[in-house]
Image (tube, rainbow, N blue to C red):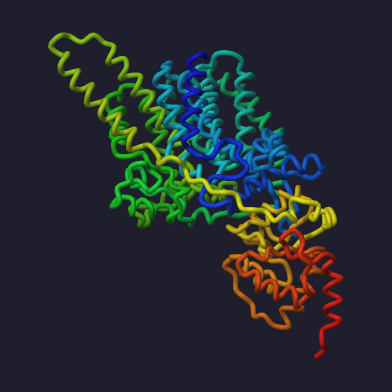
Amino acid sequence: MRFALLAFGIYLVISLVVYWPLWPGSTHMTVGGCACGDVMQEMWFLKWTPWALVHGHNPFFTNWMDVPRGANLASNTTMPLLALVTAPLTWLWGPVASYNLLMWLSFPLSAITCLYAVRKMMHSNVAALVAGFMYGFSPYMASQGLGHVFLVFVPIPPLIFYALYRILVVQEGSARRWGLILAALVICQFFISQEVAVLTIIVAFFAVVILSLANRHMIERDRVHYVVQSGLYAVVATVVILAYPVYCQLFGPQAVHGAAHGTTHSPFKLDLLGTVVPDQLQAIHPGFLTRLGNGFMGTDLTENGSYLGLPLVVVLGLIVWTMRRNRWVLYIGAVLVVTEVLSMGRWFMVANHTIRVPMPWAALAKIPIFETILASRFALLASFFMVLLVAAGVVQWIRWVDQAPRARRRDRRRVVNWALSALAVASFAVYLPRLPIMTVPMPSVPSFFTTADDLQIPAGSVVLPFPVSASPYSIAMYWQIRADFRWKMIGGEAIILTPRGHVTGQPAATSPTAVTQYLLHLSGARTRLPTFNTALIERMREFLFLNQVGTVVLDPLAPNANKALSLFIAAFGPPQTEGGMDVWFHVQALARKTAAAAPQG
């Protein structure tokens, strides 16, 4: 316990460097390149879950955004468990503070659970300390730490594999107890990130299959009975708890079916060279290599977490070769290879070139529940099995150093020891990500949404904001959470189905479509820009009535605000200024009045 507390303290101190000068729980800054896109969406989700439960709404569905259709949040990355854990902080200081705290805690918590699992399996404090650091501060963590809290908060996967280790290998204690522990871990991971939960289950399945095949001659009746008993408790408990959210996801209102990111055809698959070629997120990134590395994953650095570095790859090879008679080392290496192959997606990629060699994920991705998974995110599980190999190597190295060599071998061992030390230092130096990870200030919020001005909007009514929240520009979502969800909103960023059944991350194309396209284009989305004419003005008025819009708010400082203002004035007259915003209250009545006063013909 004393060692674990010391290690956690070390990890906490290192974590302060990750987002420096951003402090945990800050309300004025946030992580990543902008306070927009996925970052703003995740803050919205952290606010929504506790607010929905307190106000009697379904936390897995919302019509507070994407009016009138709403969004199926069970199909989105809502992180209900994290939202509930941080609810007190969210109520006191807002979801920005909760988001920043979770991002910061992700690193030390992930490191310490990995340390715990490795310590229990390897029985070495030094090996566990190294493994915890390499898992909790890996290139995967640094890349996803740019703005995906549901993917970077990963203390659960090491514990899931440790529970499986206890059930399949150790088999001490109550089978029911370990089955329920496994169920609790899977359920917690599901309510943090469904995607990580499914990724973990996929890798666990292959790990169990490989273990069973490798030890088929050692399988005994009593061991099988223990596994079956634990498995039944785990499956029953998991199914009972997850039945409703899974039902909502598959059959609930506005359920999303299909690949959210075009999975089988997306660029989010790992390149064969990704393990040895750095991108600009690594501490050491020579320019001639970085240009190649930056092109991996379709140039999306957030999704490129596969990097290990050439020295570490050499170390892994040495560990497997020198310990090839150790069945556990061969087993861990086999699972690592399988996980790396899965991470390569549908087709083989080398140096950003697709080679039409089908990979195993091409078949698995056809399974409906796997459609929305990004193959590149298997890198998280690959990093766990990588650190298990490293831990095994550290344990063996310590044993080797402790052995008293004969006099004539002492000099040779000293040379080998120095060479291994140099290789270890090089591995760490090349493996380390570039820190600190970038942070940015939160955008300023017009006083209209933070004072009594906002109370003029009827509670629960529909607001059309400009700019409309459209990925990645989602400032209106920030206005809505600062206004404590007083009003519903046209637009918003969530994975939804279009009226034609296509999956999109953009706001629903509410009727009339021409108005939606016009406003989304002005808000920064890549939509067609309809012609500004009398017909568009009429469609603008029709838009208000079809979507039950009661209030329109416009930020006069936003890009293209003058163009949107021209349309609004033509459709329902001049605004009034309230708290730094142009506002139209009771806008349907204003539209009728303006239409009646307009010259006929």
Q: Nearer the viewer, residue 582 or 35?
A: 582
Quarter location, residue 559: bottom right
244 on left or right of 399: right
- Where residue 445 sits: x, y (%)? 67, 53
In the picture shown, does residue 278 fall above or below 233?
below
Q: Nearer the viewer, residue 493 or 328?
A: 493
- Seen at 26% across and 11% down, the residue is 403
Q: Which quadrant: the C terminus?
A: bottom right
- Where residue 600 sits: x, y (%)? 83, 89
- Seen at 64% across and 64% down, the residue is 557
In the picture shown, does residue 128 fall above or below 558?
above
406 on left or right of 17: left
43 on left or right of 553: left
Quarter location, residue 466: bottom right
- Where residue 471 sits: x, y (%)? 59, 58
Can residue 548 be seen here? The reply is no
- Seen at 50% across and 39% down, the residue is 21
Q: Nearer the viewer, residue 258 or 117?
A: 117
